Image: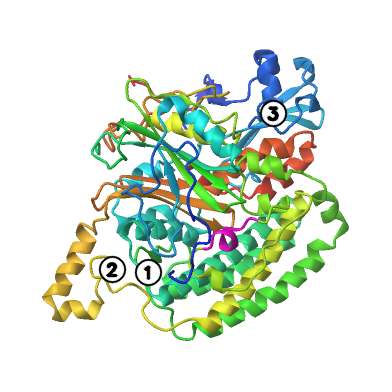
């Protein structure tokens, strides 16, 4: 591994970055690609991603979420207030060969963020997956329906308070109360 | 049988009210139930590119009356949907207007399961996602864990991993050649593809003990060293498969019927591919030279000599040619790895991460304790989060791992290339003929185990 020296990552530009790239919980090792991490407030999340897109991040690699219900004391840069959910978008710049990870805090009482679909149409299925499994709504998404679970499923399985092995299997057309 | 009973000597089937299968709002709605705005967005591709986006909304006749079109359902049990993919297609005659993939029929909650397994057990879980390239899944999970642990691997472990990934690419692409051949009516190609893949599976059985779902690449290295005489096996595999790829050329590449069905079918532009987050051979077929082995190298790929294959037109034929030539490039890579395989350890000698050798357990109390601790509670991984992406045969496979300092991942997310690439299907199918649908779905190469996870 040590033989591979990452070429870019000289000085990550702070294009509206709320957090610094020197976040303590980003592991760094020789030969591993280290990504810039940004922690925008929820209100400027869409705008920040738009700025990233304009600065050459052509593709949205991945979009997912984490439920920090049972791990609230995670390390975050100063000024970022931890919320229960975190939506994580991984942007990729093919021209600069760099990735940036945008982590936005989403509170439990209003689990909603702006959609990235108008910037990256590829976000469509990924945001539907996050909605399906975490119950986070994406404002402006054209078709926010469940994607992996059946339409009449109750609950959002990847939430930490969704018990494993304790929920009776829900079958369609099964008799009895749900 | 309870649903048949004899009434007056005549056997009658008892009538049941059949429960209609419905995924509700996940399905493709009829035109009458879709507003013009929504329709324009929908027509703009999708899964739907926004207005002013890449696709011109005027491309498709949105004024079409809904009684002229028909929505048909394909799958999830259709034989050529490569598993349980369900597509709803809106047709006008034989032309496909809109398509919507309905997925989730193979969803087993593997990301949730991953939170309940230790980092050592995690490999057995992720390997079952993309069942046609299990070693790639194990590799990305192992790399993410090692990034959090901050351990460095001995060179032999890295090179064994590269050897296995390249054999994986060959086997996965051969499998694709086989199924694609079958989808286009060439049953001989199906037999040949499986025949060649079998050689690689036999080699894996020798190395890992299993033909699929190996759990061979583990955090800290690999499970076992290569067996004696592995060089000879690899030589035979490389020579045979390289020779046979030229036989495929004779069978398929130059064949007029095959070309007719592949060339100019299912076109995608580079802009559309990037916008829809498409990666792998589909992105490269549009002319974008993006291969993570070259552009953002991991393992020791920077030391190897190989070409990134790109296409020009982004059609089915380009995707076919890219995969065929990637088999040849992988042969080239495997030969280099075979010649330069370094000696040494095949896993880190850190007893907190990898178990001690079996023989040590009998003589050392220390080793016994380590062995017991590793297999009961696992090793603790420092707090943090990491995203690692590598090039799987289908595109960028990524692992987003969050650790809370315990021996189980707090969150384990796999960015499956098939899941994302499937978003290109409506764009690829739009305006094409229904007869080409099967060929186009095949050229996307979705593996439903990974799509639904």
Residues packed near mark 2 inside 10 Å, few (<14), some (14 to 19) or many (20 plus): many
Q: Mark 2: which secondary structure?
A: loop
The span shown in magenta is: B290-297
Question: In front: A93, or B66?
Answer: A93
**Which is more N-terminal, label 2 or label 3?**
3
- Residue B311 % position (x, y): 75, 56
The verdict on a common chain for dots 1 and 2 is yes
Asked if B354 appears above or below B70 in the picture, the reply is below
Residue that badge 1 annotates? B221
- Subunit bearing disc 1: B
Q: Position of residue B142 (x, y in %)?
A: 39, 60
Label 3 element class: strand
Residue for point 45% across, 82% down: B342
- Residues under labels 3 and 2: Cα distance? 53 Å
Q: Where on the picture, by quarter, is residue B68? A: top right
Give me the chain letter of mark 3. Answer: B
Q: Which residue is mark 2?
A: B354
The single residue placed furthest to the left in the displayed view is: B365
Q: Residue visible at 40% across and 47% down?
A: A21
Query: Are discs 3 and 2 located on one and the same chain?
Result: yes
Of residues A18 and B153, the one drawn nearer to the viewer in this rendering? A18
Residue B72 is labelled as 3
Q: Which of disc 2 and disc 1 is earlier in sequence?
A: 1
- Left or right, A21 with reference to B175: left
Determine the secondary structure under disc 1. strand
Left or right, B325 with respect to B145, comes to right
Residue A114 x, y percent position in the rendering? 49, 25
């Amino acid at each position: 591994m040590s033989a591979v020296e990452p070429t870019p990552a000289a000085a990550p530009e702070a294009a509206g970055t709320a957090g610094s790239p020197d976040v303590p919980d980003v592991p760094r090792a020789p030969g591993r690609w280290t990504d810039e991490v940004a922690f925008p407030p929820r209100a400027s999340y869409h705008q920040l991603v738009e700025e990233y897109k304009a600065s050459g991040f052509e593709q949205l690699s991945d979009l997912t979420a984490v439920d920090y219900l049972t791990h609230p004391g995670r390390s975050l840069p100063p000024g970022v207030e931890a919320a229960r959910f975190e939506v994580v978008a991984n942007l990729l710049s093919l021209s600069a060969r760099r990735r940036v990870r945008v982590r936005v805090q989403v509170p439990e009482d209003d689990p909603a963020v702006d959609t990235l679909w108008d910037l990256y149409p590829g976000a469509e299925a990924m945001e539907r997956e996050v909605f399906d499994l975490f119950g986070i709504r994406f404002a402006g998404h054209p078709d926010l329906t469940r994607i992996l679970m059946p339409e009449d499923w109750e609950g959002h399985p990847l939430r930490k308070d969704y018990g494993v092995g304790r929920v009776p299997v829900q079958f369609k057309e099964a008799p009895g109360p749900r | 049988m309870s649903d048949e009973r004899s009434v007056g000597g005549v056997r009658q089937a008892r009538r049941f009210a059949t429960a209609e299968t419905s995924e509700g709002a996940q399905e493709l709605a009829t035109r009458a139930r879709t507003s013009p705005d929504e329709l324009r967005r929908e027509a703009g591709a999708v899964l739907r590119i926004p207005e002013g986006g890449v696709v011109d909304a005027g491309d498709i006749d949105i004024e079409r009356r809904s009684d002229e079109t028909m929505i048909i359902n394909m799958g999830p049990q259709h034989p050529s949907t490569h598993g349980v993919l369900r597509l709803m297609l809106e047709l006008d005659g034989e032309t496909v207007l809109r398509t919507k993939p309905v997925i989730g029929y193979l969803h087993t909650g593997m990301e949730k399961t991953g939170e309940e397994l230790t980092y050592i057990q995690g490999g057995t879980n992720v390997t079952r996602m993309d069942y046609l390239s299990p070693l790639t899944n194990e590799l990305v999970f192992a790399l993410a864990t090692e990034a959090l642990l901050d351990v460095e691997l001995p060179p032999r472990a890295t090179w064994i991993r590269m050897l296995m990934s390249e054999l994986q690419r060959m086997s996965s692409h051969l499998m694709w050649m086989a199924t694609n051949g079958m989808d286009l009516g060439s049953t001989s190609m199906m037999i040949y593809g499986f025949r060649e893949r079998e050689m690689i599976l036999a080699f894996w059985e020798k190395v890992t003990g299993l033909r699929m779902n190996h759990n061979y690449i583990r955090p800290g290295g690999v499970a076992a060293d290569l067996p004696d005489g592995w060089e000879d096996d690899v030589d035979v595999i490389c020579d045979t498969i390289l020779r046979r790829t030229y036989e495929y050329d004779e069978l398929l590449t130059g064949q007029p019927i095959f070309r007719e069905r592949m060339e100019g079918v299912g076109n995608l532009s580079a802009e559309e591919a990037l916008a829809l987050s498409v990666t792998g051979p589909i992105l490269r077929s549009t002319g974008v030279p993006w291969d993570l082995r070259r552009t953002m190298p991991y393992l020791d790929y920077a030391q190897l000599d190989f070409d990134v294959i790109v296409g020009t037109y982004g059609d089915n034929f380009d995707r076919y040619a890219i995969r065929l030539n990637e088999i040849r490039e992988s042969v080239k890579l495997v030969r280099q790895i075979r010649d330069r395989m370094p000696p040494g350890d095949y896993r880190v000698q850190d007893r907190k991460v990898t178990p001690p050798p079996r023989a040590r357990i009998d003589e050392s109390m220390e080793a016994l304790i380590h062995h017991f601790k590793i297999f009961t509670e696992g090793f603790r991984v420092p707090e943090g989060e990491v995203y690692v992406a590598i090039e799987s045969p289908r595109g960028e496979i990524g692992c987003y791992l969050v650790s809370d300092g315990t021996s189980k991942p707090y969150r384990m997310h796999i960015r499956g290339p098939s899941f994302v690439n499937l978003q290109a299907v409506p764009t690829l199918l739009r305006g094409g003929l229904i007869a080409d649908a099967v060929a186009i779905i095949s050229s996307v190469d979705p593996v439903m185990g990974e799509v639904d996870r």
